[in-house]
Amino acid sequence: MDSLIAAAARALAAGDALGALKRVSLREDPPALALRGIAMAQLGEHPRARELIKRAARGFGAHEELARARCLVADAEVALAMRDLGGSTRALATASATLASRGDRANALHAELIGVRRLLLLGRIDEAGAALTGLDARGLPPSLRAVAELAAAEVAWRSLRSAEAKAALARAHAAAEITQVPALLAEVGAAGAALDRPAARSIAAGREKALRLDEVEAVLGSGALVVDACRRGVRAGDTWIPLARRPLLFTLARALAEAWPGSVDRDTLIERAFRMRRPDETHRARLRVEIGRLRRLVAPLARIDADARGFVLVPRYARDVVVLVPPIDGERAQLLALLADGVAWSTSALALALGESQRTVQRALVELDAEGRVRSIARARAQRWLAPPIAGFTTILLLPAALPDA
């Protein structure tokens, strides 16, 4: 490795993309092309970065298998930064195996981390958590340790494990401090700020309170009967009854829970559930049918008793009833709350959960997407919507330069 390539590699490792470009910007040999591509990616010029990295991969000869594998991994990371998630992961897995077999453990683990981050962006939280569990991060460079811990924090945060998320973020911050790469420090800071923001509000016995993520977790673990307007369901302990596909029944459950320990009169329930201000006997008959359906669904957790005025919710085992609602009111807040678990939703499923038309929901999603508050994958009928990651997954791209030899 010549001195200019070595100096450019060190500059990239420190996050100094412009310094790296000054050293190799006029060179056309494969190592220089690869480093130029990495620098362009760090500067946000992703299409140009991919072009340069692909040229570098083609330029390495058949005997330079290790360098080509590093280029493949670098290209996969740029694709991740571009949110190009449609390609096959087979090439990345092959490159990771090649790197591991040739003794480049750090870059092999880097490739595995790219796979984990891809799963997170696709909303496959459980698969990402399983992949992280099997990842041996011992001896990783600090920059990669920071990325691994950010991914672990994302999994824990989406799974409502706030203590694990905070611990992972603390480890990510410690690793990022060692690197002193500004972009990486900024991503860790942004993730920490996301954990400290209000995640929901609780309504219990007529009192409302803003909750952070750890407080939401405490409410869910308290044994109370929780009607969750963020994820649209009813929970007590480990029992979860989803109602996202039964919006009318969820509306009734929420109305009953908000009035607890009192009852809700029939006309109020009809107005909230059916949006009718002048109910007649047909609406009251329909209310009885829907209350019967709700009774059967929530029977393991609560009874719904009738009285002269209306209906009252009676928990079977819990001492308290709590309603969790989004931190702010409005349709956009409800959309963000539904997406907060990181799982991919179709527009039709979101519309069904909210009881709104698909056109209304699509319009709100487009507005939120323009603000960077939601993201989509695929197109047309396959399009799915997700919450953005808590960290932006900084493209650190230590590849393909063999930094330890620099």
Image: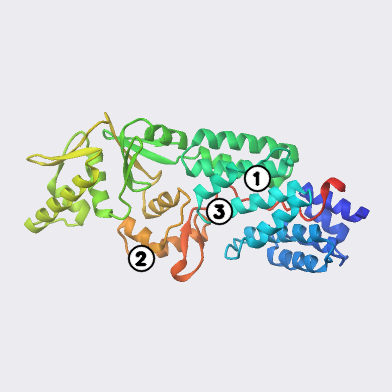
Place residue 319 in its image quadrant: top left
Q: Position of residue 96 (x, y in %)?
A: 70, 54
Q: What residue type is labelled 3?
A: Leu
Q: Do the residues labelled 3 and 2 touch (CB within 8 Å)?
A: no
For residue 13, say whether it is visible: yes
Looking at this rendering, what residue extends furthest in the right direction? 3
Which of labels 3 and 2 is toward the front? Answer: 3
Asked whether 93 or 43 is in front, the reply is 93
Label 3 to label 2, Cα distance in Å? 27 Å
Residue 98: x percent and y percent? 74, 55
Closer to the eye: label 2 or 1? 1
Q: Nearer the viewer, residue 314 or 205?
A: 314
* 353 sits left or right of 183 in the view: left
Q: Which of marks 3 and 2 is nearer the N terminus?
A: 3
Residue 403 appears at what percent x and percent y? 82, 48
On residue 183, which mark appears?
none
Amino acid type assigned to the residue bearing label 1 in the image: Val
Position above or below: 284 against 361:
above
Which residue is at a point 63% across and 45% down the rendered structure image? 187
Q: Which mark is residue 119?
A: 3
Q: Position of residue 19 (x, y in %)?
A: 83, 53
Residue 147's disc is 1
Look at the numbered discs 2 and 1 and tell me whether their residues touch, using CB distance below 8 Å.
Answer: no
Q: Residues within 10 Å of mark 3 (few under 14, many from 20)?
A: some
For the residues marked 2 and 1, what is the alpha-carbon distance in whole angstroms?
Answer: 37 Å
Residue bearing the label numbered 2: 358
Residue under the point 46% across and 56% down: 344
Q: Spatial distance from mark 1 to mark 3, Cα to Cα?
A: 14 Å
Which quarter shows the N terminus?
bottom right
